Image (cartoon, grey):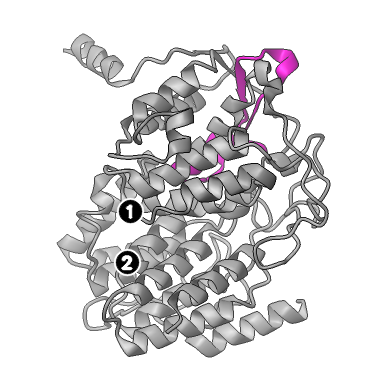
Amino acid sequence: MSPKTAFFAAALVAVGGAVFLLRRPASDEPVATSSEAPGLSSEKVSQPEPGVSPRVAMEVLEASVSAQTQQKLKVLREILATKNDNDPRLDTELRTLSDEAKALFSVQYSAFPPEAHNERGTIVFLLGRNLTKPSDVDFLVRVVGEPACLSMAKCSEPDPPSKRDDEHIETAHEVTLVYAQLVALKAAERYLKQPQPQPEVAEKLRALLEAAKESPQPRVASLAEEILSRTSL
Amino acid sequence: MKILSLALIALSVPASAYTFDDDVPQATRDQITTDMAFMGTLQGDAATPLHEQFFAKTVDGASYVRFFESRVTAVGLDDCGSASAVACVIPWMGSSRIWLTPNYTKFSHPQLAKMMVVFHEARHTETARGNWQHARCPRPFLDESGKEIKSIWTGASLGGEAACDTAAGGSYGSSTILLKNVEKFCKNCTEKVIQDAALYSNDQFKRMVGAGKEEMRKDLYSAIR
């Protein structure tokens, strides 16, 4: 780990107390759920044991949530399956999420492989539009602290050398490889620009942006810097 | 009843002016047809002067489809010489032909990002303009904060590489103009699509240099949504 990466990870741990920063679980690896789910209320949702796979965690959580939350998850999955980013239900049925729905969606995020950039980013977008208390920021902290995705095909491996000029086509990839992280930062910006942000939430978001400025991923660092300059008091 | 159902399904898939080579998988055909149909639905009540010059007076899906279909008459399948490519134009293999790679359906890009790549490539079909060849990026090639812009693949500076545009009408420029106008003026876009338009257009704008960059800065970054 480079000094910059280590500093960035330490800074994010300081922001969110997150413990999932230094390595991303592969899609079939166990994932913690209870401590990372934003706003999760143990009274409302039966918690799976730590160490279970995302798929099992999803099944456990789905069985314990309200019919309304199950419906929201169904809509989310329908939209992601059709790959229609302009589905108006994103701005209607999925505009407002309960704590229960936020918890379920955050586990759904973990259930996707890291290469599912648009699916993951869409979930970050929805959760980032529903920041209502300081603990909601923890999910964004976790996302921004994920390790770099090295290639579109497989995050853990860089692409092999190619025959043609990759610089020509890489602009879309460069953004997509850090799409979830950029969406998280944009959520912070949106919140900080609203007329009356909650001071505690705003403080955590600013700390997140400050930490993200040190990200080893240039696009994450530069967007954090831009947002801080646009939202400075 | 079954025949009627099939007929209704057939009617729901918009016909396209371009053809597909036999080896293009059905999933790829369906995806680009769906993505282009998405572009065709976009509507807005205004646009910037450069958008009017290249597309239409307002954000207008029909003009985007016309832009694509007046340039691309055939879609083929190729690896475009790269494990990471999504699409390309190979001028000596057909000037009005675009090649999609298996990554078009495999990679998880936002829908508008895929379209940005496709419209970028569509511009490259124009032989009358020398296929809008890219310009070499200046040395050093620095971003707004003075940091060197590097290739994510090699880590080397992009300075001196043919990865920039000096004309607003080029591939980087025209697709940036399209997306930036969607961000500013689209009226039937979801908030996600609008944010995607901002993220990808602002990033691609960084590949503009020289006079084209200044022209686009005045055109695109003056009106605040």
Instruction: Examine the structure image and report whether residue B31 is included in the region drawn in magenta.
Output: no
Q: Name the residue under label 1.
A: B191
Q: How far apart are marks 2 and 1 (CA)?
A: 10 Å
Q: In this view, does B98 lie above or below A20?
A: above
Q: Mark number for residue A129?
A: 2
Which part of the image, by quadrant, shows the C terminus of chain A?
A: bottom left
Picture quarter containing residue A60?
A: bottom left
Q: Is residue A66 visible?
A: yes
**Residue at image location 25% in from the left, 57% down from the top:** A94
Magenta-colored span: B85-114
Q: Can residue A51 be seen in this view?
A: no
**Residue at image location 29% in from the left, 85% down from the top:** A198
Q: What residue type is labelled 2?
A: Arg
Query: Could you tell me residue B30's position as x and y percent?
Result: 43, 25
Q: Do the residues labelled 2 and 1 touch (CB within 8 Å)?
A: yes
> 10 Å neighbourhood of mark 2: few (<14), some, or many (≥20)?
some
Q: For the residues tagged 2 and 1, is the chain the same? A: no
Q: What residue type is labelled 1?
A: Glu
Instruction: Examine the structure image and report whether residue B96 is included in the region drawn in magenta.
Output: yes
Pointer 2 chain: A
